[in-house]
Image: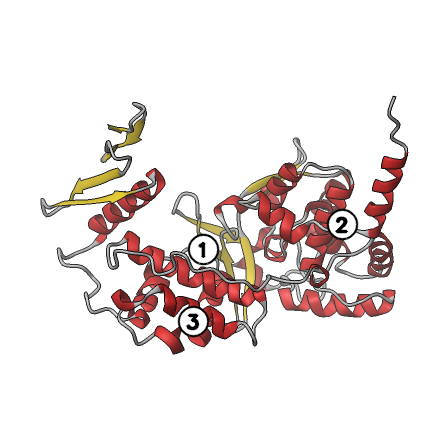
């Protein structure tokens, strides 16, 4: 075990030099030493783990990737072999941004020739025609792709170093959430809907749509009244089939204490589960990779909490939105999509006095900044309440 300058263990194969850099090394199965220097301990550990994994699973001593690799070639290898465990939607977003925005500028270039100016040029070109969220996706796709190339020794320097984008992700009023009045009007209209329990459960837990669709009975702890998020389910229209997967990120694995309303919804559905219509498609078990362990798990569709009353199959993500639009029209409020219910949950939580750090854990965010920037909004009601609270404060 190597140690850092303070005498703490860094892990096998890693130590810290006097100049502060971390030194990672190992001997591969062919008896050759591989080594590299890093400024951060986490980078050294990631490189060592990746390099040892590649060494164990490669069949030949030479690299699987030629030195004259183009950006196109690297992206194809990276998306298929290195980030294959990402959520399907994330990989889809990476591919779309690469094909539409990155590839036309640098796809033909050698991986080693890409410089920060090329990356900045791509982002600048998107400024006029794309929303800030799409520019951010391109930024993340390039950053993640090139960082992997650095970690695997195909380039020596990250070409995104110092590159930033300026366009804001969205204007504050672009993020949709329901005011208290809108929420009451919506729930009143939704009471007559077969999807009422799904909508209400999101408003009580903040689940993402894929997490709701993939909810199974085994993740409910009836004694402790909690709900564990450990998988998702979505319909892939291109393949015309259902696909199970892990939660969006490693931080999305979480256990949520249930409110009384959420518990009553799930308990009622569980007691009546044998009365619902079930299609033969529910007999299948869908495999997926657990992001935390790397092991294959299965989602048994027969155990799904929510099944469409008419088809006996899960409701597709898109069909929820279509149904929501009709309910919004009935309620006389502006149309919104399923994710707005998650936004609304977060907003109500902050209005109730919940600590942002607690909300971060309940939503499954890696960063508190994500929670505050994207999901928490100051409503007119909270402004009024804040002023009244200030007004009632007296100094003795």
Query: On the rendered structure, is 58 left or right of 260?
Result: left
Quadrant of residue 10 within the rendered picture: top left
State the quadrant of the N terminus: top left
Tell me the tag on residue 287.
Answer: 1
Of mark 2 and mark 1, the one earlier in the sequence is 1
Between residue 228 and residue 101, name the one nearer to us: 101
| Residue in view at x 32 percent, y 25 percent | 8
**Residue 84 image offset from top left, x and y in percent:** 39, 59
Tell me the tag on residue 121.
Answer: 3
Q: Extreme front residue here?
A: 396
Between residue 255 and residue 101, name the one nearer to us: 101
Q: Residues within 10 Å of mark 1 (few under 14, many from 20)?
A: some
Q: Determine which residue is flagged by label 2.
A: 378
SS for dot 3: helix
Which of the colour schemes (rainbow, by chain, secondary structure, one colour) is used?
A: secondary structure
Label 1, label 3: how many angstroms apart (C-alpha)?
A: 41 Å
Compared with 107, 112 (above or below) is: above
SS for dot 2: loop
Between residue 380 and residue 45, name the one nearer to us: 380
| Residue in view at x 29 percent, y 52 percent | 151
Label 2, label 3: how many angstroms apart (C-alpha)?
A: 36 Å
Q: Residues within 10 Å of mark 3 (few under 14, many from 20)?
A: few
Whether residue 172 is visible, yes or no, is: yes
Marks 2,3: beta carbons within 8 A: no
């Amino acid at each position: 075990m190597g140690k850092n300058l303070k005498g703490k263990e860094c892990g096998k194969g890693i130590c810290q030099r006097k100049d502060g850099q971390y030194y990672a090394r190992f001997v591969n199965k062919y008896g050759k030493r591989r080594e590299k220097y890093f400024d951060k301990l986490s980078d050294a550990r990631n490189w060592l783990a990746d390099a040892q994994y590649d060494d164990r699973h490669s069949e030949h001593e030479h690299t699987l990737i030629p030195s004259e690799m183009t950006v196109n070639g690297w992206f194809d290898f990276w998306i298929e072999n290195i980030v294959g465990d990402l959520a399907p939607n994330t990989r889809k977003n990476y591919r779309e941004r690469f094909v539409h925005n990155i590839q036309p500028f640098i796809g033909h270039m050698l991986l080693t020739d890409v410089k920060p100016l090329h990356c900045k040029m791509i982002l600048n070109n998107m400024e006029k025609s794309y929303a800030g969220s799409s520019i951010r996706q391109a930024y993340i796709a390039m950053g993640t792709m090139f960082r992997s190339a650095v970690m695997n020794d195909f380039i020596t320097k990250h070409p995104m170093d110092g590159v930033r984008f300026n366009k804001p992700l969205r204007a504050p009023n672009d993020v949709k959430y329901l005011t208290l009045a809108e929420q009451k009007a919506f729930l009143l209209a939704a009471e007559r809907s077969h999807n009422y329990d799904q909508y209400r459960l999101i408003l009580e837990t903040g689940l993402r749509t894929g997490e709701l669709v993939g909810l199974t009975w085994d993740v409910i702890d009836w004694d402790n009244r909690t709900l564990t998020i450990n998988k998702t389910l979505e319909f892939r229209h291109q393949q015309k089939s259902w696909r199970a997967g892990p939660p969006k990120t490693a931080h999305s694995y979480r256990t949520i204490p249930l409110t009384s309303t959420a518990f009553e919804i799930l308990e009622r559905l569980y007691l009546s589960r044998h009365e619902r219509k079930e299609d033969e498609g529910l007999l299948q078990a869908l495999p997926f990779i657990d992001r935390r362990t790397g092991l294959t798990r299965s989602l048994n569709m027969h155990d799904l909490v929510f099944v469409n009353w008419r088809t006996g199959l899960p409701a597709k993500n898109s069909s929820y939105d279509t149904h929501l639009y009709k309910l919004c029209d009935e309620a006389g409020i502006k149309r919104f999509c399923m994710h707005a219910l998650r936004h609304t949950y977060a907003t109500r939580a902050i209005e109730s006095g919940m600590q942002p750090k607690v909300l971060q854990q309940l939503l499954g965010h890696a960063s508190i900044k994500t929670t505050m920037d994207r999901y928490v909004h100051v409503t007119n009601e909270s402004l009024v309440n804040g002023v009244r609270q200030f007004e009632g404060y007296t100094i003795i």
